[in-house]
Amino acid sequence: MTKQTTFKLTLLASLCAGAMSFSALAQSDLFKELDVNADGMISTSEAQAHSTLSENFELIDLDADGNISEEEFATTGL
Ligand SMILES: [Ca+2]
Ligand SMILES: [Ca+2]
């Protein structure tokens, strides 16, 4: 195996590791738990299961579409 091939494999491995840690960060366990129908959004009814989320729903729903997306959920730091 040449040095260049080894370098490419190392690069590929680190890219894969980066992608995995990114997806882990993007969706927390709490988000998955609250997203009962797993559509990637927390609706007002799903938010009822979490007091902080339901009380601050309108503040967290930044684009006011009636759902909390992963991105919006991430801003809560929950
Ligand atoms: Ca949902
Ligand atoms: Ca929204």
Image: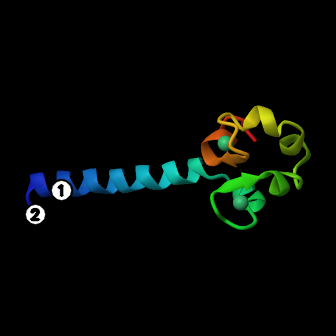
Residue 29 picture quarter: bottom right
Q: Identify which residue is drawn at 58% across, 47% down.
A: 25
Ligand 1 shows up in the quarter that is: bottom right
| Labelled disc at residue 1 | 2
The quadrant in which the N terminus is found is: bottom left
**Measured from the top left, where is residue 64 in percent x and y?**
70, 37
Is the C-beta separation of discs 2 and 1 under 8 Å?
Answer: yes
Q: Nearer the viewer, residue 14 or 64?
A: 64
Say left or right for 15 vs 68: left
Percent coordinates x, y for residue 70 in the rendering: 63, 47
Q: Amino acid at mark 2?
A: Met
Q: Residue at (91%, 45%) from the top-left corner?
A: 51
Q: x, y (%) of residue 18?
A: 42, 49
Residue 24 appears at what percent x and percent y? 57, 53
Q: Quadrant of residue 33?
A: bottom right
The colour scheme applied to this rendered structure is rainbow
- Label 1: which residue? 6
Quadrant in which residue 77 is drawn: top right
Q: Residue at x 23, y 58 (%)?
A: 9
Q: Residue at x 87, y 50 (%)?
A: 50
Count of all numbered marks drawn on residues in the image = 2
> Quadrant where the C terminus lies?
top right
Vertical placement of residue 64 versus 45, above or below: above
19 to the left or right of 44:
left
The amino acid at mark 1 is Thr
State the SS at label 1: helix
